[in-house]
Structure formats: structure tokens, C-alpha cells
Image (cartoon, coloured by chain):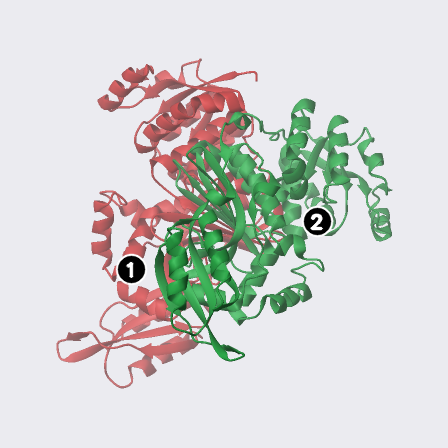
Chain colours: A green, B red
Amino acid sequence: VKVQVRRVGLIGCGVIGSAFLELARKKHSFIKSYLGIDIRIAALCDLNPKIKRIAGKLGIPFTSKAEDVINNSDIDIVVELIGGLNPAGKYIMSSLRKGKDVVTANKALLAGRGRKIFKTVSETERALGFEASVLGGVPIIKSILDSLQFGGIKQIYGILNGTTNFILTEMSKESESFSSALKSAQAKGFAERDPSLDIKGIDSLNKISVLSFLCFGKLPQPKKILAEGIERISPRDISYARELGFAVKLLSAAKSSNGKVEVRVHPALVPLGHPLAKTDGALNSVFVRTLTGGDFFFSGLGAGGKPTALAVLSDVLNISRKRVPYNFFANSGNNFLFLDKGDLIFRYYFRFSALDKPGVLAKISKILASYRISIASVTQKKSDLSQGKGKIVPIVMLTHAAKESDILKAKAEIDNLSEIREKSQMLRIEEL
Amino acid sequence: VKVQVRRVGLIGCGVIGSAFLELARKKHSFIKSYLGIDIRIAALCDLNPKIKRIAGKLGIPFTSKAEDVINNSDIDIVVELIGGLNPAGKYIMSSLRKGKDVVTANKALLAGRGRKIFKTVSETERALGFEASVLGGVPIIKSILDSLQFGGIKQIYGILNGTTNFILTEMSKESESFSSALKSAQAKGFAERDPSLDIKGIDSLNKISVLSFLCFGKLPQPKKILAEGIERISPRDISYARELGFAVKLLSAAKSSNGKVEVRVHPALVPLGHPLAKTDGALNSVFVRTLTGGDFFFSGLGAGGKPTALAVLSDVLNISRKRVPYNFFANSGNNFLFLDKGDLIFRYYFRFSALDKPGVLAKISKILASYRISIASVTQKKSDLSQGKGKIVPIVMLTHAAKESDILKAKAEIDNLSEIREKSQMLRIEEL
């Protein structure tokens, strides 16, 4: 086998970077003999002095300035693993302009600045690998681009964030509150100290934006997207939902129908029998529905150094073998529009906290009827709170399909009733 | 975009071939503008006069002689979809030698003659795409070769045959007998008239052999492999297994440990919570355990024209973009040995049909003990048969881990007991 040397410059040596370093070294001789590619880590850039010491031990040239990597003409591929918009975006753009191929795991950057970055990829005729940005080591991006898209992708759903899925799974198993489950996730290293990007659904939103771009050719504008986190989920919703045959999941979705695309992230009631409902703990998964090839399901560890490092390494190898880039722009002439949040249609789950007095249900029903929302089922649950003089009872209701904007108006009116003692819980039911 | 013309010759236009023809035509302009590849079906070979008429209508040159396709110097890629060992093998070898790339869905051929075919691929420096041979449209082969293998594959499990999985799912839902479920599968088009390749596990064996080759670099010898079908599964085993927390699946496995590889296909008790246990109906799935990337799960329609055609098309496109072939031979220097059938170790499920007389269990236990097989649990089920004078009761037993060769000897001795009135049922429990 003719051996080809590829020099890699690594910018950012945190959890993923270190795991990539380890994996690339461990697999070096296998890759060399198997693929004829001699992967050399030719520069390591980080701000952490510990990493400097490690680089020293391994004999890898170290720098604390990214420019040293970007301007190094010996380097073929820059691996960006610092995350965030800045300066990661600047580093990637300069690397491409310096004629380097780039590998990144940075979904925030792709979702936020993707248009500019992909344009630069195209102009510079360089390769950009971002398999590591979604679903860890599972080659979902390659699978979509090299196969599934030719079957006509109609819908893609994902459980794309390990932290929130771990928390919801804990809440479901232990009937724990959100805040207590969050604490135990932090203790176990499944949630960061500042978990807001995860629990508010921002990380999931970034990932579904990337997937939506791959499937439908357009990056949505983050502000226009329905994006809700899991903070307001209570264990009782999880348990009521299970009685009704659903799991509660932080679901990401991108769907195309009638020339419009909807992209959204929110907690959803998912039928218990569906593989998405069975994606538990730190696992992530993606469900793809195609026109001609049927349904596909992929799952694996969606986060963590080692699984993500596997995706980074496979991108480095695929780029070395010229199996990337893809032409991302053929689809982008698509004339579809993103569906307005308010025009989304779901069946809904409601939990009302109402004073146990006659006539409450009649008032709720009247408001719903005034918005043409019809009720599929109502159950009054056992009261478990007493507040001042009146007894509070949870009323769980499922609606038939209704328009989001109508639901929001009806909910606001219901929450204004004097008999309603706390904000009503509203969750969307996913039809799968 | 610079457009590159690729001329495809299709040999075999049955269910998959027709679906491929349709998909390639439907996606022609998308592929041309998106990838810059102009896929032209330049020849169609089949023995069916109906296909000749279809080819005529579509303006595709038709022939009934495969040689016309193979010797046509205008053709770049030969797609072989006739299946079976002969003459498919001959066609593929001649096509490669004539300088053509080849795409096939033929697992029987790869499992049976893979060594010779891959050698020819290597010698001729041509590409061979066989994504369609396993798991329909799910790009499992590409995922293994381009990604997962770099995480160090330890184990791969699959539910690789749609017919048998459909039958077992029906048996499980309806408590139907095997023969009745087979008939309904045939009526619904999920089983062929001669279903023996499927139900005897041969199709699964071919597929796990291909996967084993990809993961561990060696093709096993079919005769040396434990391969059992599902004919002897009864609905009562499925229901007893479920009570014990297991689903009964026709499981294919390839595992590497201590320098030895085991490859096998047999009905197995799979823990109900595992995604493999939840792969129902005509779905197929693969579960891969890696050293560094954790566990991966893929599922989709494993058979049928359209899903398989998607895999064929993606191979044609990947070959056109030089994203195939893979060097299959780096691994083949591996010095591992295949584990002997008799040395396999499992926990086992037994169902004995015994005369309801005192002392039967003592006799069974004594035989098991003589082979150092220890019992984990025993349950005597309700009797549902009476045979002549004695009442027959089913005794369900789980053992602790034991060696296959010991189990087979013990089972033979037990079946010889006068109190045992029919062949005992023995199923392996899969540890996952």
C-alpha cells in the first residue's frame, strides 16, 4: 500500500480533543496499514498548561496561539474542538482560506453561522467534516448524505441531547423532581455546571438545525423556531403520560410537507412503543422517515469524549480519502418556507390545577370550544395538594388535533380563571 | 458543476432490479444537479419478456444475455441482482476483469465465494459495492467500514432476516403456531413459496458472515458455524420466555474475544428491554459494541425492493465518486481462530415434556449435574396434554452458563429417559 501522510493540527484539547488524540495514536498503525494513511498530529493548540506538558511528553509541537496552527503550511487538516461561535468561527474560516480541510464538532457554529461557513467551504473547494456535531460516533450525517437522502427524506426526529434525556429518564424511573434529577446528573458528570444550553433545548436546536439543513437544504433562523426546554416537566406529567401510553422526551423534529418545513424542539409525548420513546439515559437517537426506503432508526452515545472522537477520526480519514466534501448547495435553491410556529398542529396534553368546585370543567371546555379545540379525553386525578381553603385537583386532558396559536390563546384564558391555581401544563403529542 | 456520465448495466430485473430502475430514473435530475453524476441505465439484461417490453418503453437497450452487458465497453458499472451462486459469481468476476465496477446485493455469493471475489476486486483494482446485501437501505456496511471499525468492534449482533422476524412476531402476538404464521407470512408476501433459506437461518448466516468479514477480516466456513432456524419454535416457548423477561428472536452474532471469533445464527432468548428484542415484524436491526465508542444500534426495513434499491443506488453513486472500494485485506492477516461450536458458552432455556410422575426432575437434575451444568430456576407449567394414561407436564428450566457440547450430551441423555415424551426444547440465552 502506498502510504500518504496527513498532518493534523488540533485546536482545543479538552474532553473530545484528548480522546481524539488518544484514539488517533492508538489506531495509528492499523489505519496506516489498512487505509494507507499516516495520520500525524503535527500541532496541538490549547490554553491549558497541563496540555502543554502532555504534548511535550508525546513529542507534539505545542502552541497556545491558534494562528500558529492555521498559518503552518505543513498542516493539511485542522481539527477545531474549542466549541462556541467565537473565535472558533474565525479559526475555521481562516483555515479554509489557507487551503486546509477542517473537521469540527461545533453544532452551535454550524447552526448559527452555517451559511457563511458552507459558502467558504464551497469557494475554497476545501472539505468540512462535521460528523461529530450530531449523535456522537453514529455516522448519521454520512448516512443521510451518502444514502438516505436519495430515498426522499420526509421527516427526521431525534433525541439529540444526552443531558436532558438522562434527566428525563431519571425523573421517570425515580419519580424525582427536575431539580433533583439535574443535581444527580451533574454529580454523575452527565450535566455541566451551567446546564442551560442543554436543558433549555439550545443544544438540541443547534443539532436539529444541522440535520434540517442536510435533509431540506436550508438552515432555519433560530429565533423563529419553537424551542422549549425541560425545566417545567414534573414527574407527575411523566407518570400521567405513561398511563396514557406515552413517554415524555425532549424531541427535535424537522418535517417537510406541502412545500413547508417545520423545525422544532420541545418536550413531547411519544408513543411508548416507538424506538424514540425507548431511547433512555445518555443515549441519543435519530428516526428518519423516507418516501421510498421506509423508516430508519440510529442510536448510540450522543456525547462524551470517546464516541465523539470516533466521529472526528472518521472525518479525518474520509477527508484524507477525498470522501468529503459534499455539495451542500444543490438543495438550497428549494423554494420551501419554514412553517410559522403558530401554524403548527398537534394533539395536546393538558394538566390543569383546578379548585375542586363544580363547574370548573364546564368553564375550561367552553374556552376550548370557543377556539374550536375539541377534547379527546378528560381524567380527574387524585388531589394531592390543599391550598388554603379549597382542595386542588389535577385534571388531565387530551385534545384532538388543534392549531398551536389557538391552543396558546385558550391556555392563557384558562390560566386566568379564578379556579385555576397555577399555570397549566401543556405538552405536545407527537404523531409518529 | 462538471457533470460526469456513468453508464450502468443492470443484470437481473426482478423485485430489487425494478425498484432500482424506478428510483434511479426518479432521482436522475436531483443526482445530476446535486452530485454532478449523470446516471444512465445503458443496458438491461433479464430473461423475462415482460422486462423486455418495459425496457422498450423506457428506451433502454435490452438483452437476455449477460455477456452483452459484461462485454459492452461503454458500461462503467455492472449491477448484479440475479442472486445465487451461479451464474452470478461468474458474471461478477468477468465484469471486474473487464474493468467494470460492480454493485451487488448477493449475500449468498459473498458468504460462499467472498475470498475469490474480494481477491479479484483487489487484483483488478475495481470497486465492489455490496451495501444492499445486509440490512436493506440502512448503510450498515459503510458505517462499519468508514467509522465504527476505528472504534474497535468487539461484537456485532443482528436480526438480519425479515421473514423469520415477521413470523416470530406474529407467533408472539397471536400465539400462532409456526406453520400457521408461515402461511400468513406467505399470504402477505413476507415469505417466499420456498421459504427454507429464510426459516432455516441460511440467509441470516450469509449476512452475518459478510458482517463478520467486515468486522474481523475473515470469512467463516459456513459448515463450521452453528446455524439453526426457527421451525422448532412453538408459541408456548415464546410465551414462557416472555414470562421470564425475554423475547425469542432469530439472532445472528459475531463476537471476538481472547483472539477467537464466534459466528452463529440461532433462535435466542433476548432480554425484553434490549433494542434487538423490540425489532418487530419485517424490520431488521444491527447492534454493534465497540471498545471506545460504546454501543450502536441501526434498524430499518431489511428486505423489499425499495429499501434495497436505495442501497444499490447509493453504492452506484459512491463508486462514481470513488468512495469505494475498501481495502478488505488489511485485517485478513489476523491470526484469530473461529471458536468451535462445542466450545460456545451460554445460559440455556429448556422445556421438558415429562410424564407427571415423582422423581422425573431428580433424574433430569442428576444428568445435568453429571455434566457440571447447574440449574438457575425450574418451573412446572400447567399440563395441557394428556397422552394415553399419563399426564404430560411442561417443565421450564434455566441453567447457569454451560458449555454447548456438555449441554448437547445432557440433552440427548434426558431425551432418552422413559418419562420424557417428546424431544426437549433447548434455546440459548443471549447475554447483551
The image quadrant where one finds the N terminus of chain A is: top right
Q: Position of residue A240 (x, y in %)?
A: 44, 67
Number of on-image labels:
2
| Residue B322 shows in this picture | yes
User: Chain for mark 1?
Assistant: B
In the orientation shown, which residue stands out farthest toward the left?
B388
The residue carrying mark 2 is A16
Left or right position of A163 against B165: right
Crowd band around label 1 with a 10 angstrom C-alpha radius: few (<14), some (14–19), many (20+): few
Q: Position of residue B385 (x, y in %)?
A: 18, 73
Mark 2, secondary structure of its residue: helix
In the image, is residue A304 above or below residue A416? Answer: above
Q: Which mark, by number, is residue A221?
A: none
Residue name at image x 31 percent, y 17 percent: B58
Query: Is B341 or B313 nearer to us in this picture?
Result: B313
**Would you identify the image quadrant in which residue A365 lies?**
bottom left
| Residue B219 shows in this picture | no
**Would you identify the image quadrant in which residue A244 lies?**
bottom left
User: Chain for mark 2?
Assistant: A
Q: Are marks 1 and 2 on the same chain?
A: no
- What's the amino acid at mark 2? Ile
- What's the amino acid at mark 1? Lys
The residue carrying mark 1 is B173
Crowd band around label 2 with a 10 angstrom C-alpha radius: few (<14), some (14–19), many (20+): many
Q: Position of residue B113 (x, y in %)?
A: 42, 36
The answer for how far apart the CA atoms under marks 1 and 2 are is 45 Å
Q: Position of residue A51 (x, y in %)?
A: 83, 50
In the orientation shown, which residue stands out farthest toward the bottom?
B358
Mark 1, secondary structure of its residue: helix
In the image, is residue B28 above or below residue B405? Answer: above
Residue name at image x 31 percent, y 56 percent: B168
